[in-house]
């Protein structure tokens, strides 16, 4: 017998709630810290911002690490948001799953590409 009320109520797709809300806020804070650090680095450059100056900002190991953590946070933030959009607006389960898989692969590829770019400088 299925119970539709109380603590044994079955829900589908609604179990993410608070965890996702908190994760989106946390990843947003990580991205804001990165933007602030980048802005400070850019403002400390005297003269025109050349390629060498820009590459110099990202040549520091701590900046590479912060940049990569921000890329991972942005991917996680994006996935949570897109998953919510797919769950709310895409009704066919097979299409929703395909979009989830595509989004996951795309974001993993972007994070891998960012890693390659950062440690190639």
Image (spheres, rainbow, N blue to C red):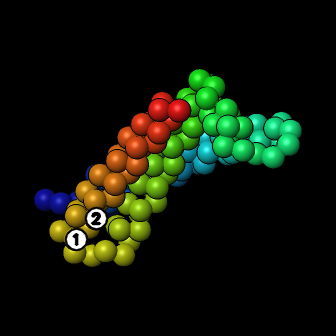
Query: x, y percentage for residue 89?
Result: 36, 75
Task: Quickly name the residue at label 2.
Answer: 99
Give how far apart the Cα atoms at labels 2 and 1 are. Answer: 6 Å
Instruction: Name, please, the residue furthest toward the left.
Output: 1
| Residue 13 in which image quadrant | bottom left
Q: Nearer the viewer, residue 119 or 25?
A: 119
Image side of residue 51 versus residue 81, left or right = right
At numbered mark 2, what does the secondary structure look like: helix, strand or loop?
Answer: helix
Asked whether the viewer can see residue 13, the reply is: yes
For the N terminus, the image quarter is: bottom left
Instruction: Name, please, the residue furthest toward the top.
Output: 61
Image side of residue 24 versus residue 47, left or right = left
Q: Residues within 10 Å of mark 2 (few under 14, many from 20)?
A: some
Q: Residue at x 35, y 46 (%)?
A: 108
Check contact, mark 2 vs mark 1: CB within 8 A. Answer: yes
Label count reads 2
The correct choice, above or below, for 29 with respect to 65 in the image is below
Query: x, y percentage for residue 34?
Result: 65, 40
Asked whether the viewer can see residue 40, the reply is: no
Q: Residues within 10 Å of mark 1 (few under 14, many from 20)?
A: few
Task: Quickly name the residue at label 1.
Answer: 95
Residue 10, numbered label? none
Q: Residue at x 63, y 25 (%)?
A: 60
The correct choice, above or below, for 102 with respect to 38 in the image is below
Q: Residue at x 67, y 37 (%)?
A: 52
Q: Nearer the viewer, residue 60 or 28?
A: 60
Q: Residue at x 76, y 45 (%)?
A: 49
Query: x, y percentage for residue 29?
Result: 64, 43
At numbered mark 1, what does the secondary structure look like: helix, strand or loop?
Answer: helix
| Residue 90 in which image quadrant | bottom left
Q: Nearer the viewer, residue 15 or 51?
A: 51
């Amino acid at each position: 017998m299925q119970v539709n009320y109380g603590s044994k109520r079955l829900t589908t797709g609604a179990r993410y709630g608070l965890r996702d809300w908190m994760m989106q806020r946390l990843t947003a804070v990580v991205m804001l810290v990165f933007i602030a650090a980048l802005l400070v680095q850019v403002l400390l450059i005297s003269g025109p911002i050349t390629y060498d100056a820009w590459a110099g900002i990202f040549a520091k190991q701590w900046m590479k690490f912060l940049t990569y953590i921000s890329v991972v946070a942005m991917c996680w933030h994006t996935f949570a948001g897109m998953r919510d959009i797919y769950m709310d607006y895409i009704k066919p389960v097979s299409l929703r799953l395909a979009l989830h898989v595509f989004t996951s692969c795309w974001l993993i590829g972007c994070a891998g590409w960012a890693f390659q770019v950062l440690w190639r400088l």
